[in-house]
Image: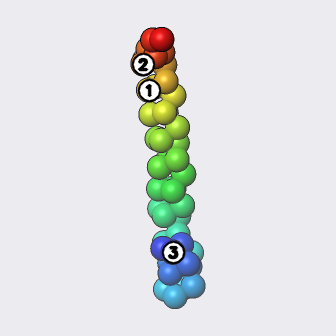
Amino acid sequence: MSLVIGSTVLKEDALAIPDALYGVLVYAGGLVYALATRRFTSPPRE
């Protein structure tokens, strides 16, 4: 939503860059956290 507001309503394409970067970093951070959690947790015992 902020990408649309920054690029169309405010007519500044440069305002969309931080929003896009934040969106990418959120997914990258989540991926790193998920992989670290999988690696450092032990499998369930049966």
| Residue 12 in view in this figure | no
Q: How far separated are the C-alphas under marks 2 and 1? A: 6 Å
Q: Which mark is residue 41?
A: 2
- Considering the numbered disc 3 on the image, is that residue within a helix, a strand or a loop? loop
Q: What secondary structure is found at the residue carrying circle 1?
A: helix
Residue at horizontal 45 percent and vertical 11 percent from the top: 45
Task: Return the residue nearer the eye: 23 or 10.
Answer: 23
Q: Residue furthest top?
A: 46
Question: Are the residues tagged 2 and 1 within 8 Å (C-beta)?
Answer: yes
Q: Quadrant of residue 20?
A: bottom right
Q: Nearer the viewer, mark 3 or mark 2?
A: 2
Query: Residue shown at 50%/81% (left/top)?
Result: 5
- Between marks 3 and 1, how big is the CA–CA gap? 31 Å
Circle nearer the viewer, 3 or 1: 1
Q: Residue at x 51, y 28 (%)?
A: 35
Residues under numbered marks 3 and 1 in contact, where contact means CB atoms less than 8 Å apart = no
Residue corresponding to mark 1: 37
| Amino acid type assigned to the residue bearing label 2 in the image | Thr
**Which mark is drawn over residue 2?**
none
Task: Quote the CA–CA distance across marks 3 and 2.
Answer: 36 Å
Mark 2 residue element: loop
Residue 13 image offset from top left, x and y in percent: 56, 75
Coloring scheme used: rainbow
- Residue 2 appears in the figure: yes
Q: Which comes sooner in the sequence, label 3 or label 2?
A: 3
Judge from the rendering whether residue 26 lies leftward or rightward of residue 8; answer left or right: left
Which residue has dot 3 on it? 1
The picture places residue 38, in percent across and down from the top left corner, at: 49, 24
Q: Amino acid at mark 1?
A: Thr
**First of labels 3, 1 by sequence position:** 3
